[in-house]
Amino acid sequence: MLKLNINYLKGSLTEDEIAYKKAAAMTAEQLLTSKTGPGNDFLGWVDLPVNYDEAEFDRIKKAAAKISSHSEVLIVVGIGGSYLGARAVIELLKSPLYNNLPKKTPEIYYLGNGLNPTALNEVLQILGDRDFSVNIISKSGTTTEPALAFRILREKLEQKYGTDGMKDRIFATTDAKKGTLKELSDAEGYETFVVPDDIGGRYSVLTAVGLLPIACAGCDIDKLMAGAKAAMEDTSKPYEQNDCYKYAALRNIFYSKGKSVELMVSYDPAYAMMSEWFKQLYGESEGKDSKGLFPASVTFSTDLHSLGQFVQDGSKIIFETVIDIKKPKSDCFLKDDPKNLDGLNFLTGQNMSDVNRKAFLGTILAHTEGGVPNIVLEMDTVDEENVGYLIYFFEKACAISGYMLGVNPFDQPGVESYKKNMFALLGKPGYENLKKELETKIS
Ligand code: PA5
């Protein structure tokens, strides 16, 4: 369902180099499967496709049906790993224009993923007086961005539905036992879903974190999990037949050859949020100890008219990973125009997907000629199975790649630095000394 194509790497590396990386990949695999590597208490995602809470899975489907039955709008509140995966899957499977297209499921908006008041007010304006529900997602239950948005939404829910009515419209996805959100939900009687202890935010899309919003959008979560299960099987194969390990190895090879940026490329704007999810997964997993590839992304052909110049001719710090979706969800046939005033009749009789494909081929040839290596990952089509497969493939490749790099792929110590400063500057109790110190530095 996701197949590695290395044909466009000729000239940038040899197949022998990939073979030489087998030992390193196997060492990484051993750390992962024996659960002896750094971060080994966050490996719950590894067998999640065959080992998940089926009772909760059913509750997710029921909650999604309930939300669809009584809400025109669902607001998903969360940040980072507590929101990116759901949004990525919904936009890829449905559309980035999901909210504007005809459908039987609720519109979905995302809040609590930043602190900009205008962005929040605009969603509230779009919501208007319509019936809505809220899915608040926070593993720690204390993250400022979602907690703030949730406070505002609770007030709105209370005004509209009263204290009892609002309970029917709040769905909290959080830790099974601890944290402010868990305590609040238990005290107020909200339905709760679990972020398992052993699954970190960025690896959590196939838990209730992602599955509830995804099910609300009308996607088939059974098929999504089936795709992930297929990937779990395929990515356990020996190195020679394991595209996931080879992809991790290729990243490692390019890193050691001086590339510092992996550019995720797609030719489908519906993939853009999936690239955002990918960037968090790889950026947060590998960017530490002064190491790691910087994950970036583009949508072509759109960005060929902006960043394309840099990719082709700029600093040689980039390699590309191109998602090649073989069959788009829909197509557009180009008819003959007898006047041909626009000179486009040479395209007559083709589908627009053929034109997009020629752009893909033309670009890949130009970029590889220009010294920018292109890894290609081929995906048959966009459906739940393929997307579930892709998610698991990237998760496992990330873990293997992180261990090959020699970092803990499951922590994120660097994320705390801005939080400490922000809390101090906001006057949060306990941060008084840091506040004084920081204020002397602000001009
Ligand atoms: O991947 C991660 O761990 C982070 O992106 C978290 O998901 C993000 O910071 C949100 O944390 P929480 O779910 O605790 O609110």
Image (tube, rainbow, N blue to C red):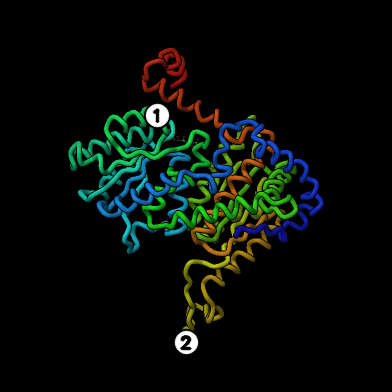
Spot occupied by residue 204 in the image (x, y as percentages of width and height):
49, 42
Q: Is residue 246 above or below residue 157?
A: below
Spot occupied by residue 387 in the image (x, y as percentages of width and height):
52, 56
Which amino acid type corresponds to the residue marked 1 in the rendered image?
Thr
Q: Is residue 243 above or below residue 340?
A: above
Horizontal relation, residue 309 to residue 385: left or right: right
What's the distance in space between the residues labelled 1 and 2, CA to CA? 64 Å
**Residue, disc 1:** 142
Q: Is residue 143 visible?
A: no
Sequence-wise, the earlier of marks 1 and 2 is 1
Spot occupied by residue 6 in the image (x, y as percentages of width and height):
71, 58
**Mark 1: C-beta under 8 Å from nearest atom of ligand 1:** yes
Q: SS for tag 2?
A: loop
Which amino acid type corresponds to the residue marked 2 in the rendered image?
Pro
Nearer to us in this view, 70 or 153 = 70
Q: Is residue 352 visible?
A: yes
Horizontal relation, residue 103 to residue 307: left or right: left
**Residue, disc 2:** 338
Say which residue appears at 51% left-offset and 46% top-offset.
Answer: 277
Residues at discs 1 and 2 in contact (Cβ within 8 Å): no
Nearer to us in this view, 339 or 218 = 218
